[in-house]
């Protein structure tokens, strides 16, 4: 027997999932203002404590004073995947999966990021379906 609160939460999740599919830019604020970053420009996001750094194509970076979890909720799950507690990557930016040191991904441009053991199988499955 499901409660009304449980039903409402499911509705919110479905609505959120639909809305995320339509997003083409993400608003990221810092002390200087707000920047609107096209999702296609994001290679990956990295966290350090309560800060998230956006690593963009062309070598640019942008740091925001929000957690990685905050941004994870805005990113479409068919385009982005959290590979580790420190990283969310855009799936199309992955060039290779490497079996070194427990598992890493190599991104466009040569950056290598660690993949958590718990996320490895799910990541490989997603990469097969791109």
Image (cartoon, rainbow, N blue to C red):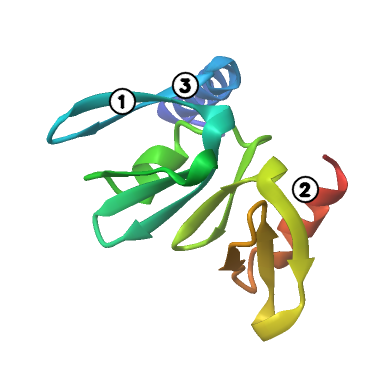
Locate residue 73 relative to residue 76 in the image: left or right: left
Residue neighbourhood size for the residue with mark 3, other residues' Cα within 10 Å, grouped as few (<14), some (14–19), many (≥20)? some
The kind of secondary structure element at disc 1 is strand
Foreground tag (3 vs 1): 1
The residues bearing labels 3 and 1 have C-alpha atoms spaced at a distance of: 10 Å
The kind of secondary structure element at disc 2 is helix
The residues bearing labels 2 and 3 have C-alpha atoms spaced at a distance of: 22 Å
Q: Which residue is mark 3?
A: 25
Residue neighbourhood size for the residue with mark 1, other residues' Cα within 10 Å, grouped as few (<14), some (14–19), many (≥20)? some
The residues bearing labels 2 and 1 have C-alpha atoms spaced at a distance of: 29 Å
In the foreground, 3 or 9 = 9
In the drawing, what numbered circle is on residue 35? 1
Q: Position of residue 102 (x, y in %)?
A: 67, 81
Q: In the displayed structure, would residue 123 be above or below residue 6?
A: below
Foreground tag (2 vs 3): 3
Q: Quadrant of the C terminus?
A: top right
Q: Position of residue 111 (x, y in %)?
A: 59, 62
Foreground tag (2 vs 1): 1
Q: Which residue is mark 2?
A: 126
Task: Tell me whether the residue at label 2 lies in contact with that at label 1, contact meaning CB atoms closer than 8 angstroms.
Answer: no
Q: In the displayed structure, would residue 83 be above or below residue 100?
A: above
* Residue lying at 65% horizontally and 36% vertically, measured from the top left: 79
- Quarter holding residue 99: bottom right
Label 3 or label 1, whichever comes before in sequence order: 3
The kind of secondary structure element at disc 3 is strand
Label 2 or label 3, whichever comes before in sequence order: 3
């Amino acid at each position: 027997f499901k409660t009304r609160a449980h039903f409402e939460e499911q509705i919110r999740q479905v609505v959120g999932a639909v809305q995320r599919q339509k997003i083409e830019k993400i608003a990221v604020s810092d002390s200087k203002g707000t920047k609107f970053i096209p999702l296609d420009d994001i290679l990956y996001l990295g966290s350090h404590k309560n800060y998230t750094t956006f690593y963009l194509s062309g070598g640019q970076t942008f740091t925001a004073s929000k957690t990685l979890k905050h941004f994870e909720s805005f990113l479409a799950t068919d385009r982005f995947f959290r590979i580790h507690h420190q990283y969310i990557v855009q799936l199309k930016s992955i060039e290779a999966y490497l079996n070194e040191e427990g598992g890493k991904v190599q991104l466009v441009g040569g950056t290598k990021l660690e993949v958590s053991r718990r996320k490895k199988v799910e990541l490989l499955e997603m990469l097969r379906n791109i």
